[in-house]
Image (cartoon, rainbow, N blue to C red):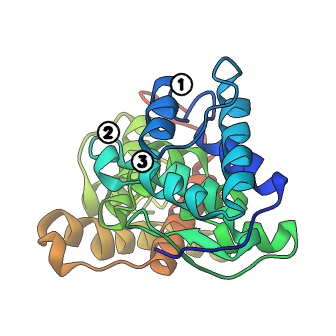
Amino acid sequence: MVAPQSSWKYPVLKAIADVLADTSDGLTGREIGDLLLRLRMDDPIPTATKRDRLAEAFVACQNKDQSSKRIVTFIVTAMDPVRYRSQPELFALRQDRLNEHLAFVGLRVNDEGKVARGAQAQTLDEATRIATSIRDELQRRKAHPEVLRYCSMEVLKKAHFHACLEATKSIFDRLRSLTGISGDGAALVDATLALGKSGVPLLAINSLRTQTEKDEQTGLANLVKGLNGLYRNPTAHDPRLNRTINDDELLEVLTMVSMVHRRLDGVPAPNGGSS
């Protein structure tokens, strides 16, 4: 853990307090009081709102110490991974939000819950870029709602292995929902997206009037089969330790899955399915 001696500007202190004392996802009033007492930090306005209470406690502590050292200690204590054993997604959420503000003082909360040195931001754009998480990047890219619905928890938990599995499964669930057909994997793709002998698939993404449009239809079917082979089958059968998926690969997979869902948007559902 770093131990900075310089003081932080009030906007940084306030922003950190706003994250840790957020109305929906922050520490409870009791947790804030317990931490302040444990770290021997004054609690100037215990009856104020959580955010104001914590911000004023930070200001009082920093004015007394002429250093941000104990603010860092508070963050580290609040972000101790042991506190998040049953809520790893909450850890990731707070970590992302804290890092966007800590970037202005050249610090970040790492995956161990420690405050470490990081790139320093001078502008809002730089802070956002430095702190951007997978979840934030998916939202920036306007990922299809079905992708976020199926794997947002895995993304927040940073479980890339299972995020790819759940995202890929979302395509097959969508195919079953649209057509009412059971089955899975390549067989389901053949039954719903492939041209087949009739040349008319159950789910046509275009008019199929030209060879180019037919090739496009076949290409989508093959892409879904490829995603199934690359990410669903291996992740469903291989031990987790044998599958390493980094941030870049995860984003690429989820972006492709999002694209597939967008191509299925607006496709007329045959009888028995739902759009």
On residue 181, which mark appears? 2
Q: Position of residue 252 (x, y in %)?
A: 53, 75
On residue 29, which mark appears? 1
Question: Would you call the spot at circle 1 few (<14 residues within 10 Å), some (14-19), or many (20 or more)?
Answer: some
Quadrant where the C terminus sits is: top right
Local secondary structure at mark 2:
loop
Q: Position of residue 93 (x, y in %)?
A: 53, 50
Ranked by sequence position, the earlier of labels 1 and 2 is 1
Residues marked 1 and 3 touching at CB (< 8 Å): no
Q: Whole-Å distance between the Cαs marked 1 and 3?
A: 21 Å
- Choose between 132 and 81: the one closer to the eye: 81
Ranked by sequence position, the earlier of labels 1 and 3 is 1
Question: Would you call the spot at circle 3 few (<14 residues within 10 Å), some (14-19), or many (20 or more)?
Answer: some
Ranked by sequence position, the earlier of labels 2 and 3 is 3
Q: Amino acid at mark 3?
A: Glu
At x 37% / y 64%, what residue is drawn?
164
On residue 18, which mark appears? none
Q: In the rendered view, would you say 238 is above or below 175?
A: below
Local secondary structure at mark 3:
helix
In screen coordinates, is 32 left or right of 113?
right
